[in-house]
């Protein structure tokens, strides 16, 4: 595949004008280069992809190597593949894909889609299956994204519909096909440890810190982007505090559960996504964080086990809670924000944020607005109600297309020659890695079982001596 990729890059990929030496001269100001505008956001999303996701998925006691390294592998392949596929839809002209930092940023969003979906099949797939998943998911995602933005024409600044909802239901479709009955009651190796939980929490912290960049990177520069950063931080803060409260309240001993802190605290970042650049008020962002966190928490507690038992959907990392339920809440809030948006609240900038509500070409009002907002492009002349209905259509279309794409991809991933691990070998690094000498799954599991039966914990040093 890398040889094929090299050929495709040789034939189709060239530099964007901002990266092409031929386009520079003595009158060109280097500081006007788009790299200075886009690179800070690219760098932040890069940290989320390669550090945040990798550490977050390294929570398995016997699956830490796989959780992190397979994320690294899948991300590296997904980005280089997305540069090609998305380039044909967004940066293709003059017979070439014109590569820029902005193109890399779009590719990383496509990569995030793959890594979210990966969470649903974590522990029961081989690295070959994951690369195949990325190979198929990115073209499907790119086609759906192009169709929704071009023909349904929606507002989705934080990627709630086209990133979180798509990735969630694609992953659920794939894991539906990869269903393993023996995993419904858990797996003996599907455990965490003190160190693996700390590593996973580190991933959560990286995602938490850089999520404002993720939500704001593609918003309109200026006050829109400023609001996006503020709303994301407020939503994350409120969801974090709510997660701590719920975790303690619903624990029989009143203690905190690490899985809640690692996942539920991030719910606010998703929930504010669809309305992140709107004038919804800080209080609304706070409320969305609380609602998203609450839905996510109870989803992990009740919905995930129900889906595994009754619907044959084994969502290993609970992506339906963190990205699906919160994505639906976020999309609903975005529709409400569109319905309530008026010129009285936004002024002329209403037609920048909601570009499809701008007057059509030839409308006298468009000329008036262009005098106030230079560069304003003609829109579709939609009313708030019409735009809200198109948002609803996009939600259902995206969920349906992603679920079908996930099911079809699951059938391909289930082919025998793609080296799927057996039920006994799931959640085990030793299947795919040369593990260190202190890695002994059978021995550690036996220690855990013996200590649990005696109602005590054996320190690891004592256990090794024994």
Image: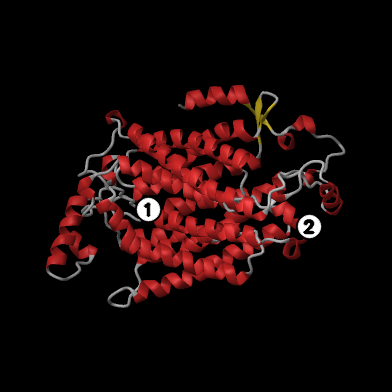
Q: Is residue 432 above or below residue 216?
A: above
Percent x, y of residue 459: 22, 66
Percent x, y of residue 268: 51, 63
Q: Is residue 386 above or below residue 296?
A: above
Report whether residue 164 is seen: yes
Q: Are marks 1 and 2 in contact (CB under 8 Å)?
A: no
Q: Please name the residue shown 39% across and 49% down the image.
A: 119
Q: Quadrant of the C terminus?
A: bottom left
Along the line of sight, the residue nearer the viewer: 15 or 438:
15
Classify residue 391 as left or right of residue 407: right
Along the line of sight, the residue nearer the viewer: 24 or 184:
184
Q: Please name the residue shown 33% across and 34% down the image.
A: 411
Percent x, y of residue 239: 48, 68
Q: Which residue is mark 1?
A: 58
Report whether residue 195 is seen: no
Secondary element type, mark 2: helix
Classify residue 376 as left or right of residue 138: right
Label 1 crowd bin: few (<14), some (14–19), many (20+), radius 10 Å: many
Q: Quadrant of the N terminus?
A: top left
Q: Please name the residue shown 43% across and 49% down the image.
A: 168
**Mark 1 → mark 2, Cα distance in angstroms:** 47 Å
Label 2 crowd bin: few (<14), some (14–19), many (20+), radius 10 Å: some
Which tag is nearer the camera, tag 1 or tag 2? 2
Q: Quadrant of residue 133?
A: top left
Along the line of sight, the residue nearer the viewer: 406 or 257:
406
Secondary element type, mark 1: loop
Classify residue 271 as left or right of residue 61: right
Q: Which residue is mark 2?
A: 348
Dot placed on the residue nearer the N-terminal end, 1 or 2: 1
State the mark number for residue 336: none
Classify residue 209 as left or right of residue 54: right
């Amino acid at each position: 595949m890398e040889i094929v990729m090299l050929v495709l890059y040789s034939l189709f990929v060239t530099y964007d004008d901002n990266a092409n030496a031929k386009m520079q001269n003595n009158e060109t100001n280097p500081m006007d280069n788009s790299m200075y505008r886009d690179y800070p956001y690219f760098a932040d999303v890069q940290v989320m992809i390669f550090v945040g996701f990798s550490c977050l998925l390294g929570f398995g006691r016997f699956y830490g190597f796989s959780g992190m390294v397979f994320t690294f592998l899948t991300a590296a392949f997904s980005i280089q593949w997305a540069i090609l596929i998305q380039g044909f839809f967004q940066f293709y002209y003059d017979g070439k894909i014109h590569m820029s930092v902005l193109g890399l940023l779009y590719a990383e969003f496509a990569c995030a889609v793959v890594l979210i979906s990966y969470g649903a099949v974590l522990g029961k797939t081989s690295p070959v299956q994951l690369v195949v998943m990325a190979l198929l998911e990115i073209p499907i995602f790119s086609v759906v994204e192009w169709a929704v933005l071009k023909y349904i024409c929606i507002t989705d600044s934080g990627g709630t519909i086209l990133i979180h909802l798509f990735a969630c239901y694609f992953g659920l479709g794939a894991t539906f096909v990869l269903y393993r009955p023996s995993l419904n009651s858990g797996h003996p190796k599907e455990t965490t440890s003190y160190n693996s939980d700390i590593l996973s929490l580190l991933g959560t912290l990286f995602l938490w810190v850089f999520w404002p960049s993720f939500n704001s990177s593609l918003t309109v520069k200026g006050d829109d982007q400023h609001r996006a950063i503020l709303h994301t931080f407020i939503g994350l803060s409120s969801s974090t505090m709510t997660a701590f409260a719920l975790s303690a309240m619903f624990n029989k001993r009143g203690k905190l559960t690490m899985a809640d802190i690692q996942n539920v605290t991030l719910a606010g970042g998703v929930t504010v996504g669809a309305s992140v650049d709107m004038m919804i008020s800080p209080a609304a962002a706070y409320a969305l964080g609380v609602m998203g966190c609450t839905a996510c928490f109870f989803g992990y507690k009740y919905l995930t086990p129900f889906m595994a038992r009754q619907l044959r959907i084994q969502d290993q990392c609970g992506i339906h809670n963190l990205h699906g339920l919160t994505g639906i809440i976020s999309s609903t809030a975005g529709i409400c924000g569109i319905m309530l948006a008026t010129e009285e609240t936004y002024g002329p900038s209403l037609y920048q944020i909601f570009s499809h509500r701008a007057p059509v070409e030839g409308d006298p009002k468009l000329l008036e607005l262009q005098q106030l907002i230079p560069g304003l492009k003609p829109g579709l002349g939609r009313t708030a109600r019409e735009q809200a209905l198109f948002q609803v259509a996009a939600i259902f279309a995206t969920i349906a297309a992603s679920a079908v794409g996930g099911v079809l991809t699951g059938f391909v991933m289930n082919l025998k020659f793609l080296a799927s691990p057996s039920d006994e070998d799931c959640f085990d690094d030793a299947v795919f890695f040369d593990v260190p000498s202190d890695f002994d799954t059978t021995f550690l599991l036996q220690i855990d079982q013996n200590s649990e039966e005696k109602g005590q914990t054996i320190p690891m040093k004592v256990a090794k001596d024994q």
